């Protein structure tokens, strides 16, 4: 049998993707990392940078730590990513985001679930949080 790198790579990535995260029920998940962004704006509606941003799981009061992808000059912050899948209930958990910049404080609640036990998914909540 001749080695066809394109065909074999496609087959291998399919298998790896299905094995990316298995729950006890045998659900195959993709290996991709999913994240839910949140845009934070200032009182003029412009993207806000240098915001002190915290996300807390309301049920347990635990802060959901995550690794931000880097500085947020465009005002886009990481609400939650797949690192939190083991902490969230599949049908959804309430998380509270608090943004502080100087004396301005804004917060919003979200319902984040992990359907199938694989990836985070926003069930409800805003896409933008405006600082007063």
Image (cartoon, rainbow, N blue to C red):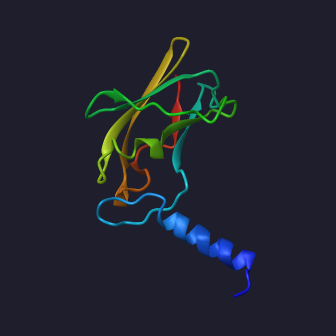
- The outermost residue toward the top is 103
Frontmost residue, 78 versus 98: 78
Q: Residue furthest bottom?
A: 1
Image spot of residue 93 (x, y percent): 31, 43
Could you say which quadrant of the image residue 11 lies in?
Answer: bottom right
Number of marks in the rendered image? 0
Q: Is residue 43 above or below residue 127?
A: above
**Residue 48 point in image, percent of width and height:** 63, 27
Which one is in front, 101 or 27? Answer: 27
Rendering coords of residue 97 (x, y %): 43, 31
The quadrant of the image that shows the N terminus is bottom right
Residue found 54% across the figure and 64% down from its top: 16
In the depicted structure, whether residue 92 falls above or below residue 55: below
Residue drawn at x 51%, y 43% as measured from the top left: 127
Residue located at (36% from left, 56% from top): 117
Q: Position of residue 12 (x, y in %)?
A: 60, 70
Which residue ends up furthest to the front in the rendered image? 1
């Amino acid at each position: 049998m001749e080695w066809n790198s394109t065909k074999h790579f496609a087959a291998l990535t399919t298998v790896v993707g299905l094995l990316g995260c298995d729950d006890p029920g045998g659900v195959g998940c993709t290996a991709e990392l999913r994240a839910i962004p949140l845009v934070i704006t200032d009182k003029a509606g412009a993207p806000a940078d240098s915001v002190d941003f915290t996300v807390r799981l309301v049920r347990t009061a635990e802060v959901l730590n995550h690794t931000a992808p880097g500085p947020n000059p465009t005002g886009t912050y990481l609400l939650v990513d797949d690192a939190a899948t083991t902490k969230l209930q599949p049908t959804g958990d309430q998380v509270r985001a608090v943004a502080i910049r100087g004396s301005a404080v804004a917060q919003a609640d979200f319902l984040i679930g992990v359907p199938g036990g694989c990836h985070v998914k926003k069930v409800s909540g805003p896409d933008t949080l405006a600082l007063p």
